[in-house]
Image (cartoon, rainbow, N blue to C red):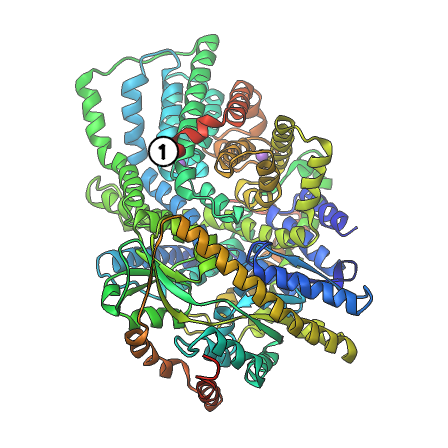
Amino acid sequence: KPRLSNVFTSADTHVSDYPTVQAVERFGQLLSERTNGRLGLKVFAGGQLGNERDTLEVTAFGGLDFNRVNLAPLNSIEPTTRVPSLPFLFESTEHMRTSLDSEIGDEILATLERHGLIGLCFYDSGARSFYNTRGPINTPEDMRGLKLRVPGSDLYVAMVKALGADAVPMPLDEVYQSLSQGVIDGAENNWPSFENGRHYEVATYYSLTRHLLAPEAFVMSKVSWDKLSAEDQAVVRQSAKDTVPYMRTLWDAQVEKSMKVIADAGVEVNEVDPAPFTALMTDMWADFIDTPEQQALVDRIMAMRGGNS
Amino acid sequence: MEILVLFVVLLLLLALGVPVAIALFGAALATFAVIDIPLVVAVQRMAAGISVFTLMAIPFFIFAGDLMYRAGIAERLVRVADAAFGRMQGGLGVVNVGASMMFGAVSGSAIASASAIGSSMVPLMEEKGYPKDYSVNITVTAAIVGLLIPPSHNMIIYAAASGIGVSIGDLFLAGIVPGILTGSMLALTAWIVAKRRGLPKGTFPGWRQFFRAVVYALPGVMTGVIIMGGILSGFFTPTESSAIAVIYTALIGTFVYRSLGWKGFTEAAAKSVRTASMVLFIIAAATAFGFALALLEVPQQLGGLIGMMTDNPIMTLIIINIMLLVLGTFMDMAPLIVITTPIFLPVAMSTGVDPVHFGIILMINLGIGLVTPPVGSVLFVGSAVGKMPVPAMVRTIWPFYLTLIAALVLITFVPSLSMWLPQAF
Amino acid sequence: MRVISDWLVKFGAAGLILMTAIIGWQVFGRFVLNSSPSWSEQGSMVLMIWYVFFAAAAGFREGSHIRIGLLEDSVSESAARKIRLVINGVVALFGVVLLVYGAQLVWLVWDFVIPSLGVSRGAAYLPIPFCGLLIVLFAVTNFMAEWRGEKVQAD
Ligand code: NA
Ligand code: NA
């Protein structure tokens, strides 16, 4: 029985016009249309219900029905989700999309079920690159000694350390001021987040390393899932999948928009030869891949390289 | 219906006299039961609600404030102020305001300021013939000026609660002028009240004594310089600066003033952990309450209510201020910031108020709530350090309440008071 | 009871001092050593849950939690005594909720990991059921004392 006068609840930390929120809103519309208004959805955007780590736990307990999260908080729950979070695993957005659209994506999503979560689909999160206040980064040498903010995640810490920089774990809301006052020299993120947090105002060098193409995930509470009929479960699964192309369109448009804002602000953007970065960052894979299950997934994703690009 | 459960349970439990934290938690629990949310979620929201990096500034600044008091730093700051202003009628009242401003400015905690200044100034003023109600009235009302003068951990809570990346640096700059203004207005009131009640005046100790006092107070004054300088030059974040304040105060208390031993240090830690936990426990419970509030979309409904009542920006700000003053009468500051920021900030912004300006309005408004009965932690501290019951205290406090209201009106309707500094930098 | 709550505050104070040292080390590591500790942020946040729950539990023995005593002050002494009995009952109930659902919480997140610490997320929530139990203990003791007509000490 859905709570709150027959609507499901979903949490998101992004603001309401962000592509992830819009995609989940679309999912709610599809759900409503396909059940003749029997089921509906209300998205609580902007982190009003808490941060991703916390709302993810609440979702697993059955306190929220849906949640859209980054892969980082899932990494601490289910080791297989570390696979698509590995730096330089995907060689292009195309490679990431075809890999996760295949049964590989479904297999990773299915591993969440043992933790009380039903993985519904992956959403794009673009390519993450480094930005800083000092100067353009062309080689790993340029990163030596830089203090770079990372989210509280082992993978990100290891990644930045592998490049010879100082990894500073810091909550996102402290980053702007820390950049402007020099507590840290830089951070890393995708175009829309670089723009949304207004970090480009203070960090004026964006170097396109594109080291991470990790997706985001849309999940449902298993508690809520188990209360649905098999027929409604199928509708939920299909509707979620159907929002993926829509989300990608929104995402690409958002990236275009952010690139323009950032360029207009006078940020110096430079292309980077990924080869030396790849060499340093793939060494650390071994520290995060410790089951045959994970290794098999890595091998299969690697085998899909060179397909479309 | 669910909203009714949330508020009826809260008000019933509060009226019964149950601790505020339990009243908030109980209301959330009852609501969760009604809308079919597992009760374990309430406990998780409570614990996770205080697992927030920026909230660490609360225990740290309270700890630093208590160390300053124990190490005699607070007392030395008071002596400087006494040497400068002691000779005018009601001069020690003005000194009290100045001392509270200086201490509150550095510690950022109204509770720490009221306990530190109250315990050193109230006996000193009593010695010199001032009535106790007068000293305590000044101590508690001037304590809230420290909320406006940076650094202020309540501003950090506000920046986090705003969810739109309000710059803490801008908030700190924005608080300076309103803080000095409010302090000056309180000092003026202290002087006028002293004249009307015919209170005594002291004598100037001479320049020699004055400079001696200044020199002795210098390492204490440096606390503020180090905190602000350290933040502005990128040595540490505002949250980290609170821990640095503890370490610095402990070091100069031990090695410069030699008035703080290991025993004093651990006693201060025990006292601070009691005070800070009381506050953080309410914030924790308020997080569970806030989750229910958000799920039931109370913020949107209240915001809509204001929209229905008026679309005049001035009326909107007046209504928001009245709602906040009423809420502040019953609840404490930190949980109120967490709960009311998402409700009122979007409404205020829709009338063209800058989020930085709104943060300053929120600080003084909720600060007034700290010194008004029935729930006001600073009022309770004043009653404790002055050893007088709350009713006797508030009987003569009204000139100071009126001054604070006047300052609130000025700060609300003259945005440039707040926005001038952040826009200049 | 007093001994227990004093120990809780001592643990809490130790937690606060330790947290000061951790954040001091974090600043030192980043600024002087140019190598930030990766565990300090998560570590201090877990520590904060621990000491807040410890000291808050002690606060129920000490009667230091902020509350509105208006009703109690405005009725007769025998009615006030009944109100205090009810309040202690509510506090005990709160303790039971923390004990039962806190334990469930620890159980539910036991196989989740706290990043950069590598320990179970359950470790962060571990003090909750423990403090719930102590709150029940304190509330029941206060209730019994009130029932027998003794003055419950407040300090
Ligand atoms: Na301050
Ligand atoms: Na109040």
Q: Is residue A103 visible?
A: yes
Q: Name the residue beneath numbered marker 1.
A: B103
Q: Amino acid at mark 1?
A: Phe
Q: Secondary structure at mark 1?
A: helix
Q: Position of residue B391 (x, y in %)?
A: 59, 27
Q: Is residue C137 visible?
A: no
Camera-nearest residue between C6 and A181: A181
Q: Position of residue A286 (x, y in %)?
A: 36, 84
The answer for which chain carries disc 1 is: B
**Residue drawn at x 52%, y 58% as measured from the top left:** A254
**Quadrant of the image where one finds ligand 1:** top left
Horizontally, residue B222 falls left or right of residue C18, namely: left
Q: Position of residue A288 (x, y in %)?
A: 40, 80
**Residue drawn at x 45%, y 19% as measured from the top left:** B185
Q: Position of residue A164 (x, y in %)?
A: 26, 69
Q: Residue furthest left?
A: B208
Horizontally, residue A82 falls left or right of residue A15, namely: left
Instruction: Assess disc 1: are there few (<14), some (14-19) or many (≥20) residues with their C-alpha within 10 Å of its C-alpha.
Output: many
Horizontally, residue B245 falls left or right of residue A92, namely: left
Q: How many marks?
A: 1
**Residue drawn at x 32%, y 67% as measured from the top left:** A272
As displayed, is residue C22 above or below residue B218? below
Camera-nearest residue between A171 and B371: A171
In which image quadrant can residue C13 be found? bottom left
